[in-house]
């Protein structure tokens, strides 16, 4: 359906409209200036000269997207995000491998139950003797044959030891846990900094 073009005003209608328009008195004459100012404010400002434009770089004003929340952070991420409980300077020396562990335990080849009991005994004895820095060697774990639909992470002891150290009954004895420096075993060992004996 086509729309009909408006016919426009005839000369006699135009004359009548002009008479009405000239005899009309505005209800609120002061609003006319307010309306005019609002219209003027809405007009775009004149473009600046090209030499006044700021330099443009692609992506310069783009916002960086926030990092998505990782529902399964790696063990190194969790340990690095743990709050620092010990002296910052001493922590730096420890992470660079400049502090020598006073005692060490090697959990290679142990079952989970045996390793847990050995770790409990070792930490409690070291704390009772006043040791501050001990080394717990877990190894990096062996590649197992992964035949199931759900992939298994390698290194069960490597993943369990930080959990045991941050759980009861060892939690009150442990001040800080960090991955060892390469000269002390790297990612296959942990520095455990113990609290002072009272």
Image (cartoon, rainbow, N blue to C red):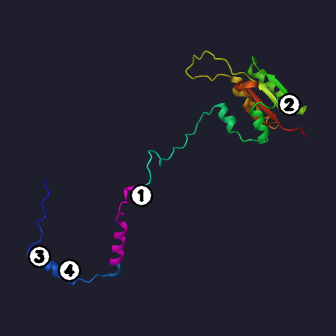
Q: For the residues marked 1 and 2, what is the alpha-carbon distance in whole angstroms? A: 72 Å
Q: Earlier in the sequence, mark 2 or mark 3?
A: 3
Residue hosting label 4? 21
**Label 4: few (<14), some or many (≥20) within 10 Å?**
few
Residue hosting label 1? 52
| Residue 147 location (% of width, % of height) | 57, 16
**Would you say residue 104 sits in the magenta stretch?**
no
Q: Are marks 4 and 1 in contact (CB under 8 Å)?
A: no
> Within the image, what quadrant is residue 3 found in?
bottom left
Q: Earlier in the sequence, mark 4 or mark 1?
A: 4
Q: Nearer the viewer, mark 1 or mark 2?
A: 1
Range of residues picked out in magenta? 32-52
Q: For the residues marked 4 and 1, what is the alpha-carbon distance in whole angstroms? A: 47 Å
- Confirm whether residue 5 shows in the render: yes
Q: Which mark is residue 124?
A: 2
Dot 3 falls on a residue whose secondary structure is helix
Q: Earlier in the sequence, mark 1 or mark 2?
A: 1
Camera-nearest residue between 55 and 177: 55
Q: Nearer the viewer, mark 2 or mark 4?
A: 4
């Amino acid at each position: 359906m086509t729309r009909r073009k408006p016919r426009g005003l005839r000369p006699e209608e135009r004359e009548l409209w002009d008479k009405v328009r000239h005899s009309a008195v505005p209800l609120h004459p002061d609003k006319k200036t307010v309306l005019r100012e609002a219209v003027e404010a809405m007009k775009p400002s004149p473009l600046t000269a090209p030499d006044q434009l700021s330099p443009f770089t692609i992506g310069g004003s783009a916002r960086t997207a926030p990092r998505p929340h990782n529902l399964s952070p790696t063990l190194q991420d969790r340990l690095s995000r743990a709050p620092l409980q010990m002296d910052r300077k001493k922590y730096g020396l420890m992470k660079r491998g400049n502090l020598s562990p006073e005692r060490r335990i090697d959990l290679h080849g142990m079952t989970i139950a045996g390793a847990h009991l050995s770790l409990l005994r070792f930490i409690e004895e070291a704390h009772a003797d006043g040791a501050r820095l001990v080394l717990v060697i877990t190894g990096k774990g062996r590649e197992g044959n992964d035949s199931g639909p759900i992939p298994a992470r390698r290194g069960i002891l490597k993943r369990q030891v930080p959990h045991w150290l941050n759980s009861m009954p060892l939690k009150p004895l442990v001040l800080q846990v960090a991955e060892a420096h390469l000269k002390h075993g790297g990612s296959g060992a942990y520095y455990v900094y113990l609290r002072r004996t009272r």
